Amino acid sequence: MDIEVFTNKIFNISSEDEFNYFALEAFMFQYENNQVYNRWCRLMQKDISSIKHYTDIPFLPISFFKTHRVVSFSEQEIHFFKSSGTSGKDTSKHFIHNLDIYEKSFTNNFESFFSKAEDYCFIALLPNYISQGNSSLVYMIDNLIKKSRFKESGFFNENLGDVISTLKHCQENNIKTILFGVTYALLDLIDIENLELKNTIVFETGGMKGRRKEILREELHKILCKGLGVDSIASEYGMCELFSQAYSKKDGIFYTPSQMRVLIRDTYDPLSYVGENKTGGINVIDLANIYSCCFIETEDLGKKHTDGGFEIMGRFDNSLTRGCNLMYEN
């Protein structure tokens, strides 16, 4: 398999048949080159020769990233990303072989949903992500900031006064702006001052991180819309274990780029899938994740919509490492 050819083509997939072809290519490559994934497939007693469609492919429980080195390469990794666990324990690690693929993926994803990164001023209010280190989200936004043609772009830590003045400057000068903010920091921002951000897309990255009481997404977005003077709140569905992101421009409905698909598995039978508008566990195919694992069973609950979008309904209670237990027992 020529990885360079593969990664050049997956960002321009235009049909389900084409996606299926590349998904099967990725599966065979990772079955042969990823020891953790290979062992999982064998434990699942899957007849590899029977796999003709991506819905037949075994998905690796995401908990393996906490306990195993999930890689499809033999060389030493050049970097790693880790998850933002609030406890600081049992965090996932995604070992990286090629950062160019990640950069190409998130740049293509962002620009396909919005427009050229250079056209925006990026204001990042992500103090907890910065303090934890090795955040894939921080890496992505830092790269987008460097692409921006506006010197006002940057990370603002917890300097809320500077955030407000920069947002007002961009507003007054008709500069298209994107504000990325962790949930509690956005709420802290509007506690200081209500704004009218007519040229700004606001991304709420999720999580109170123990700083505030958790509230329902609908209520949260209503509060943020009123306090920031915007019509809707955008979101990104990504994680350290993935190289691709799905985006929601409003209403919490996410859409995937060409190299990514979301399937909804039955909560009682993880090897079966449910239909549209039914809640189940989220499985993600991310073909950009070729050097790790493209087929990940997450611990998120969601449902698909008839137009191909999906929404997040929550998480499994007490999500446990069912897969890891099997691996240790065998």
Image (tube, rainbow, N blue to C red):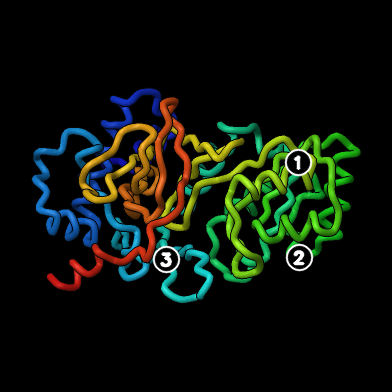
- What label does residue 110 carry, if any? none
- The mark that comes first in sequence, 1 or 2, is 2
Q: In this view, does 61 lie above or below 17?
A: below
Q: Which quadrant of the figure contains the C terminus?
A: bottom left
- Could you tell me if the residues under marks 2 and 3 are in contact, i.e. CB atoms within 8 Å? no
Residue shown at 73%/64% (left/top)?
Answer: 157
**Mark 2 / mark 3, whichever is N-terminal:** 3
**Amino acid under disc 3:** Lys
Task: Quarter of the image for the N terminus: give it.
Answer: top left
Give how far across and how far down residue 290 sits, in percent.
Answer: 34, 48
| Secondary structure of residue under mark 2 | loop
Whole-number angstrom distance, CA of label 3 to CA of label 1: 31 Å
Which quadrant holds residue 133?
bottom right
Q: Count numbered badges in the picture.
A: 3
Q: How crowded is mark 1: few (under 14 residues within 10 Å), some or many (20 or more)?
A: many
Which residue is identified by label 3? 93
Q: What residue type is labelled 2?
A: Glu
In this picture, residue 161 sits left or right of residue 25: right
Q: Observer-nearest residue: 233 or 243? A: 233
Q: What residue is drawn where x is 62% and y is 33%?
A: 114
Quadrant for residue 273, please give it.
top left
Give x and y (percent) for residue 149: 76, 41
Residue on which disc 2 sits = 158
Name the residue that disc number 1 marks: 177
Q: Which amino acid does label 1 sit on?
A: Thr
For the residues labelled 1 and 2, the Cα–Cα distance comes to 19 Å
Residue 289 x, y percent position in the rendering: 38, 49
Q: How far apart are the alpha carbons under marks 2 and 3?
A: 26 Å
